[in-house]
Each structure stands twice: as structure tokens, then as C-alpha cells.
Amino acid sequence: MRRPGLWLSLILALLLALVALWAAGPWLAMRGIEQALAQRDPARLERHVDFAALRVNLKAQLADRLVHAAGPQLQSSRLGGLALLAATGLVGASIDTVVTPVGISALLHGQGGWRKATGNTETADTHSPPARPQPFARIHWRYESANRFSASRQDGDGHITVFIFQRQQLRWRLVDIQLPPGWAAADVLG
């Protein structure tokens, strides 16, 4: 009555299904983000983006750029140090305000008006809805480890933006956006 081959086949099929689900995780997260942005659904966006980690990573990245742009002469003066401290605080406050589900949705709502005004709409008719945001269009991807995935996108000017996804338990979530030099988050998400 026992069939060891059947049980072995079932276990192997289950393992293959788990590996397929793990491998598809980043793609499902990217699709979920694009759908949430298109529908302006902050709750859905929050399922696919770790906003706390994203804020920390963007703050560090932009603060580092600010300090490097200031140069050693400004960094070494007391007044320059105070100015850098204040500017870094403003960058942090700006990131805290914008990098939230509601902030990203509001930012994209404004960009939707800009897309419509510039003729970037779903159809050739300027009265049609603005084109859907596609942050993951034309990406190059790679698994950096079993828990980390990166998706890189190059724009027409050669600037590269890297989206970093990390596995958190069974779900993949966006945790970092490595911005090209001189770019802002609004340029990346549209």
C-alpha cells in the first residue's frame, strides 16, 4: 500500500515550487510596486517597500553626497561644519516627509500632471490620462545573494539607478534606491 516514489515526487515538487516562489519574489514585488503606483494605493505600496530601511539608506546616501560636494575646505571650518549639519538635517527631514506611502503617492500625482502637460500620456491624445509610472522598465537584474536582488536601469543620458530588494521572511521588499549623481527621487520614480 505504501508508495515511497509518490512521496518522494511530492516532496520534490514542493521543493521546486518553493524555489520557484523564492526566485519570482523580486519580480512580484516590482510588479506590485508598479501597480500600487499606477493605482495610487499607499497601502498596497507599503506591502512591497520597506520605508524605514529606504529612508535610512537614502538619508545616508544624500548626506554623503552633500558632504562630498561641500569639499574639505568647507568641512574643516566651524561655520561650514554648522552649515553642513543644518543642511544634513534638512535632507533628513525632506526624506522623512517624502519617503512614505502617502508622500510617494502625492509626488507621483504631481508628476502625473507634469506628464499630461508634456504630452506623456497613455495615448497620443493630450486629454487622455498621464502615462503610468514604470520605474522598472528596461532593467538589468541579478541576484546578489540568496536574500538580495538588484535591478539596474539606465536612462537615455547614461545615468544608472539601482533598486535593491531584500528578502524579509517570505516576502521581497524594496530597501534601497542608489540614485545616479545629481538625481532626485522624483526623477527615479517616474
Image (cartoon, rainbow, N blue to C red):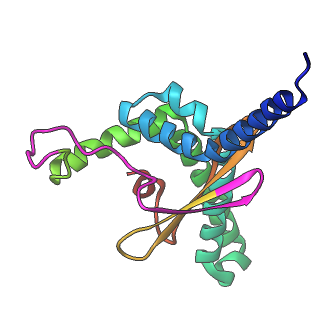
Return the residue found at the far top: 1
Q: Quadrant of the N terminus?
A: top right
Could you say where residue 5 lies in the image, as x and y percent from the top left? Answer: 85, 32
Residue 139 part of the magenta segment: yes
Could you say where residue 92 lies in the image, as x and y percent from the top left? Answer: 62, 50
Residue 72 lies left or right of residue 36; in this view the side is right
| Foreground of the two, 5 or 139 | 5
Residue 74 lies left or right of residue 36; in this view the side is right
Q: Residue at point 66% right, 55% down?
A: 149
Task: Examine the rendered structure and indicate whether residue 41 appears above or below residue 83.
Answer: above
Residue 54 lies left or right of residue 78; in this view the side is left
Residue 169 seen from this side: no
Dominant SS of magenta comes to loop
The total of numbered circles placed on residues is 0
Could you say where residue 132 lies in the image, as x and y percent from the top left? Answer: 31, 43
Q: Residue at point 39% right, 68% down?
A: 155
Q: Would you identify the image quadrant in which residue 157 lies?
A: bottom left
Could you say where residue 96 lies in the image, as x and y percent from the top left? Answer: 59, 42
| Foreground of the two, 181 or 4 | 4
Q: Residue at point 35% right, 72% down?
A: 156
Residue 87 lies left or right of residue 187; in this view the side is right
| Foreground of the two, 41 or 6 | 6
Q: Would you identify the image quadrant in which residue 11 lies?
A: top right
Return the residue found at the far front: 1
Return the residue found at the far bottom: 73
Residue 80 seen from this side: yes
What segment is highlighted magenta in the picture? Answer: 123-149
Q: Residue at point 38% right, 50% down?
A: 134
